[in-house]
Amino acid sequence: MTLLKFVDSASGKSIGAFSWYATHGTSMSRDNKLISGDNKGAAARFFEDWFTSTESNSSRSVPTPSNISKLIKKVRSIKATGGKPCDNSTSRSFKARKSDGSQFVGAFCQSNVGDISPNVLGAFCTDSGKPCDFNHSSCHGDVTLCKGRGPGYPDDTLSTKIIGERQFNKAVDLFMSATKELTGKVDYRHVYQNFSEIEVELSGKTKVRTCPAALGPGFAAGTTDGPGMFGFQQGDTEINELWKKVRDLLKEPSQFQVECQKPKAVLLSSGEMFEPYAWTAASTLYGPHTLSAYIQEFNHLALAMAKGRGVLQPADLSPPDLSSKVLRLLADPFPDSLPGGKKFGDIKQDVSEPKGGSFKKGNRPSATFWSANARNDLLTEGTFAAVEMLQGQRWIPVYDDDDFCLYFKWKLDNSSLYTSLATIEWEVPEEASSGVYRLRHFGSSKKAQHSPIEYFTGASSAFTVS
């Protein structure tokens, strides 16, 4: 891992750190349906919270009440609030961390990742539990059965947390020991380049050319972190007749492309496909000399920067503005509806009182609210969910949906196509203080396709953590 620490020159205060480490953000498998920053996002959250707590010599915990039994009696009288209207900025004030520009930034960047997987236990067959065929990443010839296992297997969320914590812990070590100050100016060189027709000079003065982009069977085979389609394996040099017919319906590769890309078989000749716009996504796209072309062109940029020279931008190679041509395959949200007598933000299923009357660390209290389509407004800089703690006479937000321990789950109610349910789950973390809590939901609704958005909130009944 490499870490760059940022320090304000005037105050000497640390304001951020960027770290580079090579591992894919694939701890969460593609079976996961929740938005996640994966292991890099988890590491960033842990790092930023750690710095904030050490700088202030405190955490988000508060003194523990001395008499839990009295609290349990008290919370039984604090019922759910019911749904109430609010405005589009209300949820921002319920963030546990305020976005005022003063926050420490801990970024976990990608490095020379190649095929490095965070699923460190290895790849196993889902039908037999035995290791996959190493050379083909398949089970009995089927890539869809071969899946990688993270250190928290079978729990993807736990695997994400573990891999995130490993990066976070190393970053803290480097951050605390960083002493070498970087000096000088920040410089860069940038150019747009068409890699489908670059002349490359190899050793011995041999000159070759790259090819129009093409995807091969290795792309379709996927990886152990995300298995591909049936009929493909890693290492395939031929494409079966069924997939050739499917390919040719889209675009049959030219003979020039077939010869140029050898020994890779052409599954999709993306560099010869231009409708609805130019196609491209993958590695070694431009034929067997792709790597040599990258090295050559990056050498040109590095040399220009080292000698203080500019670089010539080839004409007409700036990326086109495709915003007017983007295909939308996801329909706009339907108008939202509710059962009779209900309001958005009302409780459908309240927090259930646990045995003993109080939740313990690691328990997961949850509540389900009558809600609306979460795509009406993504509540940018706000939150769909919050955990509030009663401190004196005030409810204070202590966790929000940016926290690893808080889950926001949306779905359609089974009884109606237009009625939504939102479930908030809080996995009580070890650092949580004993006390009185409740779960709060924020959302937005539309009565008709083009009607204005209306905002709402609601909170569950109170419960205790001990």
Image (cartoon, rainbow, N blue to C red):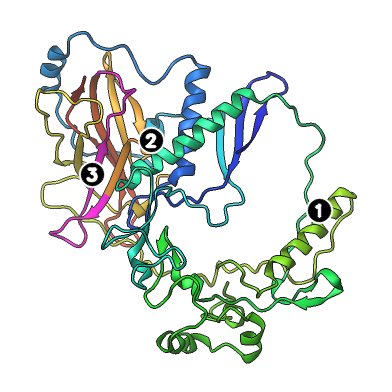
Looking at the picture, which amino acid does disc 3 mark?
A: Thr
Q: Which residue is mark 3?
A: 423
Per the rendered image, the range of residues in magenta is 410-434
Kindly report the distance in space between the C-alpha atoms of the residues bearing marks 1 and 2.
Answer: 40 Å
- State the mark number for residue 403: 2
**Tag in front: 1 or 2:** 1
Q: Assess disc 2: are there few (<14), some (14-19) or many (≥20) residues with their C-alpha within 10 Å of its C-alpha.
A: some
Q: Tell me what residue is drawn at x 82 percent, y 35 percent.
A: 184
Q: Assess disc 1: are there few (<14), some (14-19) or many (≥20) residues with their C-alpha within 10 Å of its C-alpha.
A: few
For this view, does 246 lie left or right of residue 442?
A: right
Secondary structure category for the residue under label 2: loop
Q: Which residue is mark 1?
A: 302
For this view, does 317 lie left or right of residue 239?
A: right
Secondary structure category for the residue under label 3: strand
Q: Position of residue 265 (x, y in %)?
A: 55, 81
Q: Position of residue 352 (x, y in %)?
A: 12, 33
Q: How many marks?
A: 3
Looking at the picture, which amino acid does disc 2 mark?
A: Asp
Q: Assess disc 3: are there few (<14), some (14-19) or many (≥20) residues with their C-alpha within 10 Å of its C-alpha.
A: many
**Tag in front: 3 or 1:** 1
